[in-house]
Amino acid sequence: WEKARRKIYPILRNQLGHDFAGYKPNTFARRVQRRMHVTHAASLDAYVERLKSDPAEVSALFRDLLINVTGFFRDKSAFEALAKAVIPEIFAGRGAQDTVRVWVPGCATGEEVYSIAILAREFMDGLTAIPRVQIFATDIDEHALSVARAGRYPREALEGVTAERRRRFFHPDAAGFVIAKEIRELCVFSPHSVIRDPPFSRVDLISCRNLLIYFGLDSQNQVIPIFHYALRPRGFLFLGASENVSQFGELFAAVDKKHRIYKARDGAGSRLRLAGLMGPQRTDFRAEAVARAATTAGTSLRDQINAQVLGEFAPAHVVVGRDGDVVYYSTKTGKYLEAAPGSPSRQLLTMVRKGLRLDVRSALRECVESGARIVRPGLLSEGPDGQTQLVTLTIEPVSGRNGEEPLYLLLFADQGPPGTEAEAISRLRSSADGASERLEAELRETRERLQSLIEEYETALEELKSSNEELVSVNEELQSTNEEMEASKEEMQSLNEELQTVNAELHGKVDALDAANADLQNLFESTQVATIFLDRDLAIRSYTPAVGQLFNILPTDRGRPITDLASRIPLPGLADDIAQVLADGQRLERRMEQAQTSYLLRVAPYRDSSARNEGVVVTLVDVTSLTQAEAHLQVMIAELNHRVKNMLTVAIAITSETHKGARTVTEFRVSLIDRLHAMARSYELLSRENWIGASIDELVRQQLAPFGLERVTFGGPPVKLKPRQALSVGMVLHELATNASKYGAFSADAGKVDLAWTQVDGEIRLDWREHGGPATGEPPRRGFGLKLVEREAAHNLGGEVKIEFPSAGARASVAFPVASD
């Protein structure tokens, strides 16, 4: 793997301009293995060769290495702590002419950037003087930056956003939600590498969450001082849950260790540390860092300390933290401090010269615990030249600013010139007011015991230091392991999101397939068409339930050749028909007759999505009703032809007889049209009944309506007449009504007609009775109308008619047999 990484790093660097040598090796290896699985690379060497020849795969590996896992207000409690502890601090004392600057390196698709912008916007709502806010969001992934710039996110991405924030800071659109303009205007997105490019400066807050977990130790040691350089004095650093700056205690002080919020310390030493970490590609930036550190780093702290020392002492001095770590040195401290052997250290107690170490330790502890000024005069210090100096040690606390931890000022004031140890002790004795020899002896004895204890303590301290170094080493390994686990978690989350997307697409396709299968199953079950799907070997693929009426088939018969099944109807030539369709790919249809049942056999090619012929579809449709309908249609056509012929014959006869009996052309025209209308009404009634027949009741209404149904009383049992009888009865009723309108009841206003019919013993009888009209008598001759009534009754109805003319009104009785089927 080491050899392969050395080959892959320059490929990525040369093509994309980004160096992944500082990436965690295990994470890098996992992402490369993932791409190998995707591309089906046989070996690592084969994948390296593909990278050399395939720029698209280099870009794909680059995208996989950039694990863009983020979200709005990710780790809600951390953002709540940020809103309470940091946001008010960076706005404190700022006016409209000031600028609050925030840097978010590794911003991915921008959710974290907009989360911080929302917190800033909410805090700004309560300010009277609102400063300008600039949030610089950077990443090396141009695609992720384009998503962040658009500020458009799906509905699922806003699960961590409260309903109130969603209503105020997001606008819905067809694809999800778009960030509001007032938030978008606070943010500037640009490509930037924290490893390669110069950092931003004078930043109040850096939010770099879950970026360092992908960096190796060397890259972390380079990036964290860069962040310190980019921050203003007492600026804030916001890291992820698995990241910390424990190795850079001189650069950052913890504000909230649980939520990984740190504040930048001040001091020249911390700024100058950056200069040694700059690579050869950053010489300009290194020169800038050294110049800035030499001129500005620690200026405010030095001014404060110098003012206090110059006001009282002006001796050699140092400033330490509560744990004894040196923050600041003055000049001329070499008489009291010397570098300890081993690795460089800022621990004061390891640098204090022999003789002062015990007193400095105890005095510093007392000052830290009491917070009061501690003065220890008459201390012996062995200088670098072997001479002994009497020293007065003064320790006093220096108040921390803006909630920072307090510092402690140690002052070393000489008492007289240096000399031998005996001279120093003599001066010390002469300065004492009558100190006795006994006290000197006790003091000497006590010093010797203390020196012995100190040596034992120092030995134990060295052992403890060794143990501490081992613990630090273990802690670093644990931290590295934790970062690896966090990186793996991020990768798993990224993979999980991809799987969720694929799963959602798969669910959609499965649902669509289920719906299609359900539709197809319902179609199979609802259709009465027997359909069998066969492959090229005539094996059954599927079939509709109606097939069970024609074949002895079971659900377990899928996959069996259809030729193995027995059919309930003969299917001669089926195998030949199937072979023909498989050969030429053309649809084939033919009809088969079986007893009283007719079937339409249709054999069509079964084609797959590529239009290849993969079998046949055999369909057997029961067309018995269609065959019967065709036969019935032929009968109906023949009957219609016959009826038309008869109708024309009747029309010709009516026309001829009407012409004979008409005295004038007008009389001829009126009589002929009336009779033809009567025929038309009967035909209309029969057509409405599909020429099945017509009831006498409907026939009476149709024929007598022109003469006024209100003057007719009619009734009888329900009687259905055949079409031929209906036409004849219609003509009879018309002629009787016409005669009544000329000479009988309908010719007078008070005249009425009673019409009744009966059906007894296979005979239908109609009785026509007129009354209320003019007195009638036997006519001297029978006109065409009466003759037509007699002819229709005798010839077409096969019955007889009896017509009488008593004085009360004309009467007619027509009797005819019921027509057989």
Image: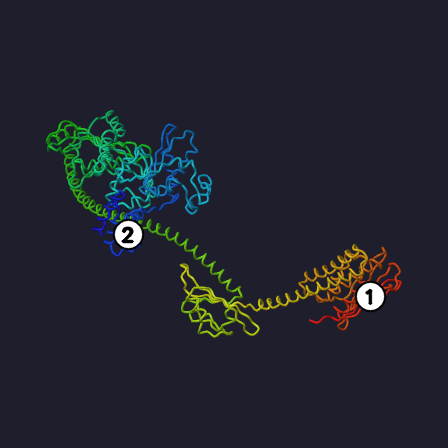
Q: Quadrant of residue 358?
A: top left
Confirm whether residue 75 shows in the render. Answer: no
Q: Is residue 353 above or below residue 592?
A: above
Whether residues under marks 1 and 2 lie with C-beta atoms below 8 angstroms apart, the answer is: no
Q: Which quadrant of the rendered structure holds the C terminus?
A: bottom right
Where residue 591 appears, as percent x and y from the top left, is 52, 69
Residue at the image point whose x is 63% and y is 68% from the top: 635
Dot 2 corresponds to which residue? 30
**Total number of numbered discs in the rendering:** 2
The kind of residue tagged 2 is: Arg
Identify which residue, 684 or 758, lies in the foreground. 684
**Foreground of the two, 224 or 546:** 546
Relative vertical location of residue 796 with respect to residue 443 in this rendering, above or below? below
Relative to 294, say whether 769 is above or below.
Answer: below
Looking at marks 1 and 2 on the same chain, the residue that comes earlier in the sequence is marked by 2
Kindly indicate the quadrant of the structure image that contains residue 346: top left
**Amino acid type of the residue that numbered disc 1 sits on in the rendered structure:** Ala
> Can see residue 649?
yes
Residue 748, position as x, y percentages in the image? 85, 56
Q: Nearer the viewer, residue 551 or 557?
A: 551
Residue 385 image offset from top left, x and y in percent: 10, 32
Query: Which residue is at the front of the view, 81 or 635?
Result: 635
Q: Percent x, y for residue 667? A: 80, 56
Q: Crowdedness of circle 1 by 10 Å Cα count: few (<14), some, many (20+)? A: some
Q: Marks 1 and 2, Cα distance to the nearest angstrom?
A: 112 Å
- The residue where tag 1 is placed is 812
- Find numbered disc 1 in the image and state the secondary structure of the residue it sits on: strand
